[in-house]
Amino acid sequence: MDLPLIARGDGWVRTEGRFYRLGEPARTPAPEPEPEAPAAPYTPPTDEEIDDLLDGLPDYGLDPR
């Protein structure tokens, strides 16, 4: 459907039904990035892993007796 132009100015046109503001054409949106692979499910550390971590910590605040 073609609408007849009634008036035209710098950056605008008028048809029978409304005004249109002219400008830069709309940019197409950037493509959405691919979704990342889901992270591995959480597994709590084993007792041995916790013991190894605790063994590596300094003995702050312990009575050296």
Image (tube, rainbow, N blue to C red):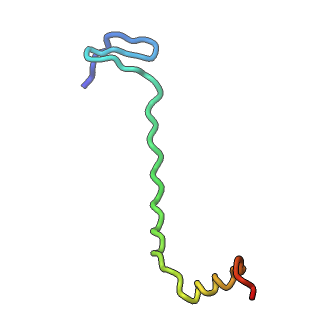
* Identity of the residue drawn at 49% across and 80% down: 44
Q: How many marks?
A: 0
28 to 51, vertically: above or below: above
Q: Is residue 65 left or right of residue 17?
A: right
50 to 3, vertically: above or below: below
Q: Is residue 8 left or right of residue 33?
A: left
Quadrant holding the C terminus: bottom right
Q: Is residue 32 left or right of residue 1?
A: right
Which quadrant holds residue 41?
bottom left
Which quadrant holds residue 64?
bottom right
21 to 6, vertically: above or below: below
Q: Position of residue 46 (x, y in %)?
A: 53, 86
Q: Position of residue 35 (x, y in %)?
A: 45, 61
Q: Position of residue 49 (x, y in %)?
A: 59, 85
Query: In this view, which residue lies farthest toward the right?
Result: 64
11 to 1, vertically: above or below: above
* Identity of the residue drawn at 48% across and 63% down: 36
